[in-house]
Amino acid sequence: MAVLPGPGYPAPAKLNLFLHVVGRREDGYHLLQSVFTLIDRQDTIRLRVREDGVIARVNDVAGVPEAEDLSVRAARLLQEHTGTRLGVDIELEKRIPMGGGLGGGSSDAATVLRALDGLWGLGLGTEVLGALGQRLGADVPFFVFGRTAWVEGIGERLRPFELPPRWYVVLVPPVHVPTPLVFGAPELTRNTEPLKMEDFSARDLPGATRNDLERVVVGKFPEVARCLTWLKGKSGEARLTGSGGCVFAGFDQREQAERVLRERPASMEGFVAQGIAKHPLAS
Ligand SMILES: C[C@](O)(CO)[C@H](O)COP(=O)(O)OP(=O)(O)OC[C@H]1O[C@@H](n2ccc(N)nc2=O)[C@H](O)[C@@H]1O
Ligand SMILES: Nc1ncnc2c1ncn2[C@@H]1O[C@H](COP(=O)(O)OP(=O)(O)OP(=O)(O)O)[C@@H](O)[C@H]1O
C-alpha cells in the first residue's frame, strides 16, 4: 500500500550488453567500455516536497537502511549542492532485484535527481545532474543521460547508440554479488583492446564482445554459473550483466523470450523485460 499519493516516478533497470575492462585508473577505478540499455523492469519512487528542509524515507525497504539508500543520498547531495531550503519525503517501491548488476540503486538515485530538479525548481539540467550523480555511483550518469548508450571511462563518457527492439530473458540467481569484490579480484583481466564505436552496429556486438567480469563471478558464485550454463543452452548470446549476478539473453520476438522463460527449471527465478530506447523521464 502506497504511503504517499500519486503514480510516482519510474526508475528503470539496465543491462550491460557487453562489458570490457580496458584499464585501471590510479585511484583503483576501472576503465570500461560497455553498451547500456534500459529495460522496462522498474522501481517506483513517490516524492512529496517538504517546506521544513527535512529529507526522510517514509517506508521500510528490506536490505536498504535509510541512511545508505541511494535515493535518499541523491536528495541530500542535491540539497547540499544547491543550498535549497526545501526537503522531501521519499517512498521507494523496489521491483528491481538488488545486487544483480541491474543498476537499481543507481537508477533510483538518477530518478530522484531528475524529479527534484523539477519539484524543487532548480533547473540544473542533464549535464550538471549527471556530474553530481557520478559522486553517488559509476552508473548514475547513464541513468541521468537516459537513453541506450555506448559508455566509456568509468561510466561517465556517454554517446547514444541505436538498438533494434529486443526482449530479454533475465535470470536472477539467489545471490548478492558485491561489485568491489569482482573488480578487486586478482584474476580479473584488465587489458581488453579498446573498440571503436563507429566500427559496430547492434548486430555485430554479441559476437565481438563479452563481459570481462563474467569469468570472475562464475568462478566465485556457482548459482550464477548454473543459470548462465542453462541460458547459454538456449542462446549463444547469454551473458552476465554488470558485476552480476543476473544473466540475460536477448531475443527479437517477445514470444521467443517468453517461451525460454517458461522452459526454465522451477528453481530458477527470472522475468522477461523489453529494452527501452529512452528513459520515461527524459525529454
Ligand atoms: C559494473 C557496473 O555495474 C557496470 O554497469 C558498474 O560500473 C558498477 O557501478 P556501481 O555499482 O554504481 O559502482 P560504484 O558504486 O561506483 O562502485 C563500487 C565499486 O566498484 C569498483 N568499480 C566500479 C566501477 C568502475 N568503473 N570501476 C571500479 O573499479 C570500485 O571498487 C568501487 O568502489
Ligand atoms: N535505492 C537502492 N536500491 C537498491 N540498493 C541500494 C539502494 N541504495 C543503496 N543500495 C545498496 O546498493 C547495493 C547494490 O544494489 P543495486 O541493486 O544498485 O546493485 P547492482 O544492481 O548490482 O548495481 P550495479 O549494476 O551498479 O552493480 C544494495 O545491496 C544496497 O546495499
Image: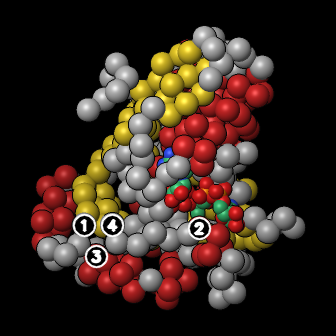
Q: Of callouts 3 and 1, which one flags the residue occurring earlier in the amino acid sequence? A: 3
Q: Could you tell me the amino acid type at mark 1?
A: Glu
Residue 18 location (% of width, % of height): 51, 65
Question: CA–CA distance between discs 3 and 1?
Answer: 12 Å
The one of 59 and 137 positioned closer to us in this rendering:
59
- Tell me if label 3 and label 1 are in contact, CB under 8 Å: no
Question: CA–CA distance between discs 2 and 3?
Answer: 22 Å
Q: Label 3, secondary structure: give it.
A: helix
* Residue at mark 2: C-beta within 8 A of ligand 1: yes
Image vertical order of residue 254 relative to residue 1, above or below? below
Q: Of callouts 2 and 3, which one flags the residue occurring earlier in the amino acid sequence? A: 2
Please rate how many residues cluster around mark 4, counting C-alpha atoms within 10 Å: few if below 14, some from 14 to 19, many from 20.
many
Q: Could you tell me the amino acid type at mark 2?
A: Thr
Q: Residue furthest right?
A: 26
Which residue is identified by label 2?
179
**Side of 145 where 192 appears, left or right:** right
Q: Of callouts 4 and 1, which one flags the residue occurring earlier in the amino acid sequence? A: 4
Which residue is identified by label 4?
172
Q: Could you tell me the amino acid type at mark 3?
A: Leu
* Residue at mark 4: C-beta within 8 A of ligand 2: no
- Tell me if label 4 and label 1 are in contact, CB under 8 Å: yes
Which residue is identified by label 3?
231
Which residue is identified by label 1?
269
